[in-house]
Amino acid sequence: LTLKSTAATTTLKKAAVDDRLVAPAPGPKAPVRGAVRARDGKIYAVLKPSPLNAPSPFAAYDPATKKWQDLGVIPIYVDDVAITAGSDGRVYLVGGSDDPNGVTGASAEVVAYEPEWSTWLRLPPLPEARAAHAVGTCPDGRIVVAGGWHFNGLSAGPTYLRRTDVYDPRT
C-alpha cells in the first residue's frame, strides 16, 4: 500500500502478524547480496562492497529495535556467496566467487560469524569450490550445499554443478 501526500511519499507495508500498518525500517547503506534470520532473531546480511574489489560489509537488522547495526567487513573476499543460519547460533557464509571481476573463480571458503562474540571463524573448506549455489541447515547442524558453478578458465567457461554436498562445520 502506498500513500501519497504533497510533502512526501510514504510506503507502508501490512504486518502479517497483527494486521496493522507499519512503516518499513531504513535499510542498510548498500544493496543486500544475501541475508538470513539467525537463532537470536536478528537478520544478518552480506552487503555489496564498494568498490567491487573491497571486502563485503556485513550488517544485522534487529526487528525488536527496528535498527541496522554495522558489523564491519567479512574477512575474505566473496561474491555470489550463500548464507545460512546454523543451529548453533552462528551465521555461515559458504563458497562464492573469489574474483571481484566475476571472471575466474569460485571459492571453497567457509567462514562463520559468531554473534555472541562478534567474531569470525575460518572453517575447513568445501570439498569443491562453488558459487551461485544454495545452502540450508539441517536440525543436527550440518549444512547442505547444492548446485552452483565453478570456473574452468576463460576459454572453457563455467561448469554447472549437479551435486549436493553435506558439510559439517564441527569437523
Image (tube, grey):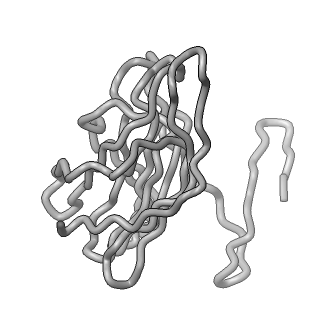
Measuring 60% from the left and 22% from the top, which residue is drawn there?
156
- Horizontal side, residue 22 vs residue 26: left or right: right
Q: Residue furthest left?
A: 117
Seen in the picture, residue 98 relative to 39 is either above or below; the reply is above
Viewer-side residue, 79 vs 23: 79
Viewer-side residue, 39 vs 27: 39
Seen in the picture, residue 164 relative to 95 is either above or below; the reply is below
Measuring 49% from the left and 54% from the top, which residue is drawn there?
35
Measured as percent of width and height from the top left, residue 80 is found at: 51, 39
- Horizontal side, residue 13 vs residue 145: left or right: right
Q: Quadrant of the C terminus?
A: bottom left
Measuring 40% from the left and 72% from the top, which residue is drawn there?
41
Measured as percent of width and height from the top left, residue 162 is found at: 60, 55
Seen in the picture, residue 124 relative to 57 is either above or below; the reply is below
Residue 159, picture quadrant: top right
Residue 39, picture quadrant: bottom left
- Horizontal side, residue 3 vs residue 118: left or right: right
Measured as percent of width and height from the top left, residue 143 is found at: 38, 68
Whether residue 44 is visible, yes or no, is yes
